[in-house]
Image: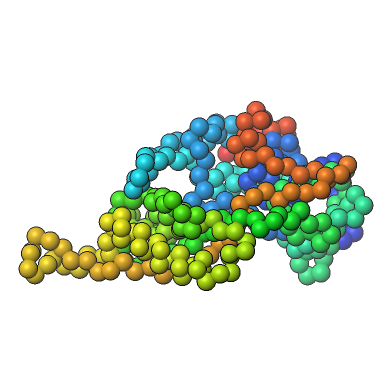
Amino acid sequence: MGVKLSRHVYEYDKIVVGSSLRALLYAYYNGLPVIFTKINQPTLIDYFEPQVNLEGFNMQNETVSLVSAGAEEFRGASKIDLWKRISFMLSLSGLMPLADKAESIRIDDGSLRIVLGNARMANFNFNKLIMFDEGNITNLQPKREKNPRFKVLDWVAVKSGMSHEFDVINTEDDFVKKIVFYKSLRIMGNRNVKDLVSVSYIDKDNLQKHEYSDTYARLKTLGIMKETGIRGTRNGRDSKNPEKYKYYAIKLENDRREIIPDFFHTWESSDSIEGNYMTESEIISSYSDTTNEYLRMLNNKL
């Protein structure tokens, strides 16, 4: 018979609240448990700067040169790979006690009361919460930003215009600031055809305006691709000049839009609540190793 979580009280000195890479890094280095209601992992296009040292995780941060329409650009290792690695190690070590089962959190005088699925409850006593990116706490909300800025990712399926040399195109505008091309995940056995995501930075007041919609982002992206010299799928040879090929028009289809805060949530500090605002690189450079021996063993073996 399983343990009734509502009758069991977990006891911890400190608890990390959040599931971003920043939160998991901090939990790993300090050997702390992690509680969250929403998985907040890096995206497919999030990479470290090449100078960040990842050797402490047995990962090589290899520099990759990108084909760009402008200045030479470089990127390092994928952030999602490190997120998955740390998440796996924290899970194996028992430091993700609820995994992704928490639905809401309430703070009640040194205790976390957490609602799980099927009307179950879990209780955690603590001395201090280290707050990162969790926003689903019923009686504690981050400070409100005045007209905050968001990073908006418009993921696009490229139906015609998938084969070209470019990895990234940068622009001068915040709306469609960057177009990132990546190996398409839609096509089995794909070797050299690409889908894309456009990256924009939009103030909250403009998020619902039509001129900042995913449709406008797609149309602007299509225009930028044309200006860069990208063409649609090849359509045979030109009958008037057999040495030249004809091409279909570029065709793009919106897949989904992600809206991500381009700021850290800030929290009212107290004796029991502490906000952490370090970047991933700052956290990595501040620690040499984890304080938890079991995590250290896992990291050496994986």
Q: Relative to 155, does residue 13 appear above or below in the rendering?
A: above
Residue nearer the viewer, 152 or 207: 207
Side (left or right) of 89 relative to 102: left
Residue nearer the viewer, 13 or 167: 167
Residue 52 in sight: yes
Q: Position of residue 117 (x, y in %)?
A: 76, 67
Q: Position of residue 3 (x, y in %)?
A: 84, 59
Q: How many marks?
A: 0
Q: Relative to 297, does residue 173 appear above or below in the rendering?
A: below
The chosen color scheme is rainbow
Which residue ends up furthest to the right in the rendered image?
109
Residue 5 in sight: no
**Residue at coordinates 90% horizontally, 59% vertically from top-left?**
7
Q: Position of residue 156 (x, y in %)?
A: 44, 64
Q: Relative to 60, does residue 147 appear above or below in the rendering?
A: below
**Residue at coordinates 76% horizontally, 44% vertically from top-left?**
275
Dividing the picture into quadrants, the one containing residue 93 is top right
Dividing the picture into quadrants, the one containing residue 241 is bottom left
Which image quarter holds the C terminus? top right
Which image quarter holds the N terminus? bottom right
Which residue ends up furthest to the top in the rendered image?
288
Q: Position of residue 13 (x, y in %)?
A: 85, 41
**Residue at coordinates 40% horizontally, 41% vertically from top-left?**
73
Residue nearer the viewer, 113 or 1: 113
Side (left or right) of 297 relative to 242: right
**Residue at coordinates 65% horizontally, 56% vertically from top-left?**
148
